Amino acid sequence: MSRYTRRELLRLLGRAGTASMLGAMGLPLVGCGGKDESMGEAGEAAGGRQTALNRPRVVIVGGGFGGTSCAKYLRRYVKDVEILLVEPRQTYHTCPFSNTVLAGMNPIDFIAHDYDTLRSAHGVEVIHQRVGEIDPVAKAASLDDGRTLGYDYLVLAPGIDMRWDAIEGYDQAAAEAMPHAWQAGDQTRLLRAQLEAMDDGGTVIIAPPNNPFRCPPGPYERASLIAHYLKQHKPKSKILILDAKEKFSKQGLFMQGWEALYPGMIEWVKGSDWGGMGRVDAGQKTIYSMFDKAFKGDVVNLIPPQQAGEIALRTGLANDDGWCPVDQRSFESSMHKDLFVIGDASVAGQMPKSGFAANSQGKVCAAAIAARLLEVDLPEPSYVNTCYSLVGPDYGISVAAVYRMQEGQIKSVEDSGGVSPTEADAEFRRDEARYAEGWYQSITSDMFG
Amino acid sequence: MPKHLYTVALCLAVGQLPATGVATELTRGAMLANSCAGCHGTDGHSPGAIPSIGGKSSAFIETAMKEFRSGERHGTVMGRHARAYTDEEIRLIAEFFGGEAQ
């Protein structure tokens, strides 16, 4: 029996509370049921459960900016849906504000969040498991503990994974010596410890990748806040940015801020000037250019090229570049129906890969799924991104954009958005630093609160 | 019997009610306003330094947005945002957050 037949039957019978009737009619009910049942060990893997209440089920894979926002906003739109959020970590560390942890401005707990409120206040079943396989045809996801979750809709919000094959000499083991710290948590702690252990007069190398990558202004905020730390504690030290790119996000504003706050401390070198990434020797903390010129650091923060989280690749949702094409109105995968990809993993028109963008996309995706569950039309979506960066604790800058669907793509609205003014005074920069922290409190409460 | 009553009757019959709380209506206004929450907090209730807009009157929000858009009102990032919205979109956003006040 196809799911469509079951859905049609449900419509005929009045949508909710009909499972027992269907059960009584002897119809199989795969992958649907009340939430107690879903958590029980009684096997969905065995296939087919009959429960008291038939609710559609949405499985969300990944509990970061996109996944949490999607779960919470889907619940706001639809009360009568089972929402399962699958995320292996019990504690999530945000990448935003992890640079303040590197600089010693905040303890790592500042960026740690849990899923208690999503569970208790928003009726989201949070399952701390890793997803093994997703079968888009059978519409089921297997977990590492052996369970299989059937779904009506599945949202993948897997974030990024590093492309460990991209740079000769840079693998997972090398990332212990030369941390990327581009996924927060242990890598953040590691890089912080290396900065603390470094002698005054040392050189910190930061090596950002080519576009597209997670958080385009992130490496430059990182350079800024590490400079803030070094200026106080190790003022003879230097930061060398060996960029793969020829230019970078908010470049004019960052360089203006570096000149004002850390004159002579940060040197940025564009790709064509140093030759670009050739290979690395992690043991020697040395980067070699394409022309084999050596750059040795005391601390090396290598941010490698990235791709969609590996589960998206294994499920066959990515293009040749390693990112997932979607219908940008709903975030439904271009590869499989009823399967959605949001956040950094998705190809989302002109939106950057940022936590804010993922939050905005999670809400649009929630609306798209709600529209299907409620059988109404999806209103025209609207998307926003605002990226604050701290150049120093009292010196903030931002870039903002509002987006619409235009000619099948997410594009920023003309004559709006843009970066903070170049000529702003100290008060303006201080206000934006204050708003940067305010933004962090707002968005994390919007996700986890 | 109207469909929703039928649904309630069925739920009662199986001894379980749908999750409580009032659902947000899936409207263009909600699509626009939810994107504001990334900075202003869920339903416009900000826990930090960014001003709350939830609970402000619709008239206040509509006027403020139009003043940000024209540059009459000083802001850091709001002028850049407000320029993206039409009068109608501003009205829908204001109604959404103003509606929260009641």
Image: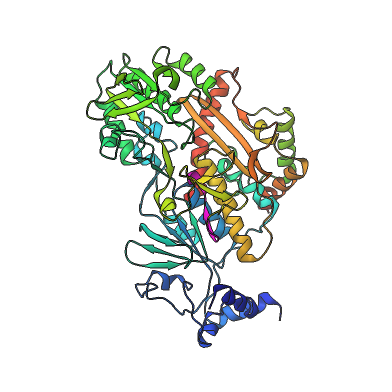
Q: Is residue A206 left or right of residue B68?
A: left
Relative vertical location of residue A351 with respect to residue A124 in this rendering, above or below: above
Q: Residue at x 66, y 66 (%)?
A: A375
The answer to whether A165 is drawn above or below residue A299 in the figure is below
Residue at the (63%, 61%) spot, across then down: A371
Residue occupying image coordinates x 37% and y 76%: A46
Give the residue furthest to the right.
B87
Residue furthest to the bottom in view is A25
Determine if residue A307 is in view.
Answer: yes
Which residue occupies 59% across, 77% down? Answer: A5
Residue at the extreme left: A283
Image coordinates for residue A227, horizontal then vertical, percent: 38, 21
Q: Nearer the viewer, residue A445 or A287?
A: A287
Look at the image and tell me whether residue A16 can be seen: no
A151 on left or right of A108: right
Q: Is residue A388 magenta?
A: no
Task: Report how many numbered discs are placed on residues in the image.
Answer: 0
Residue A426 in picture, x, y percent from top left: 55, 19
Colour scheme of the picture: rainbow
Q: Position of residue B102 (x, y in %)?
A: 68, 54
Residues rendered magenta in the picture: A336-345
The residue closer to the viewer here, A168 or A231, is A168
Left or right: A336 as drawn, with respect to A417: left
Question: In the picture shown, does residue A340 fall above or below A174?
Answer: below
**Image quadrant of residue A297?**
top left
Camera-side residue of B80 and A407: A407
**Residue A391 location (% of width, % of height):** 47, 24
